[in-house]
Amino acid sequence: MTWSPWARAYAQTPDTYIWGTEPSKLAREVSARLPPGARVLDLGCGEGRDSVFFASRGFEVTGVDVSAAGLQKASRLAQAHGVRIRWVSADATHWAPTGLFDLVYSCGALHYVARHQRARVLSQLQAVTRPGGYHALVVFTDRHIYVEHGERIDYFAEDELDRAYADWHIRARTRTLITCTGDGTPHRHSVEQLLATNAKVLRPSTDARSTLASR
């Protein structure tokens, strides 16, 4: 992976949730598409706000992050909300998920995966997604670059997700600029938000709970 400053930031703020404890707008939107008991993989879960939200909706959640300090905060948040989550301390480039998921979710993490490793990581994530299942991603793109905390990012090219999801159904895509003050100075990042569905055809014998409604 490229270098991220957030593991250090989480360790330096054990009593403060840098990103807050309320779920992101994307987590709220995509959760409405999932069947009861859906299996959710939150890759780069950080301090756990979205993992905890998904679990509070009754989903079976696996939260993965490279930061042990972030996962400690995430675990406390889950306990405070009375939900159980499987936490995995791992680098996405060296960890392979098992089983099938109804949703693979990653908000602001995949751009830390080095470009030469991303195709393999995305392919692995697609392989563990149920037919009809979703990927919901937010990544930083190279349209507008601002480096904070000395982080090293392989910014996504504008067509990179298009190529990676060429055989999936694209349900929604947004390319925009977001405002950030993560380093104390107001600045903007260009981001792409993608919601895509695995286009594989469901077999008649497939468990009905894996059928996801398109809205």
Image: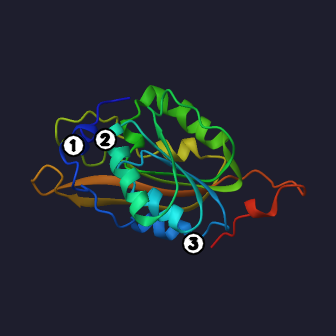
Q: Residue flagged by tag 2: what amino acid is it?
A: Ala
Vertical placement of residue 173 versus 95, above or below: below
Residue 111 in view in this figure: yes
Residue 91 image position (x, y, % from top left): 44, 31
Vertical placement of residue 82 versus 119, above or below: below
Q: Which circle, 2 or 3, is nearer the viewer? A: 2
Circle 3 residues within 10 Å: few <14, some 14–19, many ≥20: few
Q: Circle 1 sits on which residue?
A: 9
Q: Secondary structure at mark 2?
A: helix
User: Which residue is drawn at the image coordinates 59% and 46% (left, top)?
Assistant: 165
Of mark 1 and mark 2, the one earlier in the sequence is: 1
Residue 38 image position (x, y, % from top left): 65, 60
Q: Residue flagged by tag 1: what amino acid is it?
A: Ala
Q: Circle 3 sits on which residue?
A: 32
Residue 18 image position (x, y, % from top left): 24, 55
Q: Secondary structure at mark 1?
A: helix
Q: Residue flagged by tag 3: what amino acid is it?
A: Ala
Mark 2 touches mark 3? (CB < 8 Å): no
Instruction: Give the CA distance from mark 3 to mark 1.
Output: 32 Å
Vertical placement of residue 191 versus 31, above or below: above
Q: Circle 2 sits on which residue?
A: 69
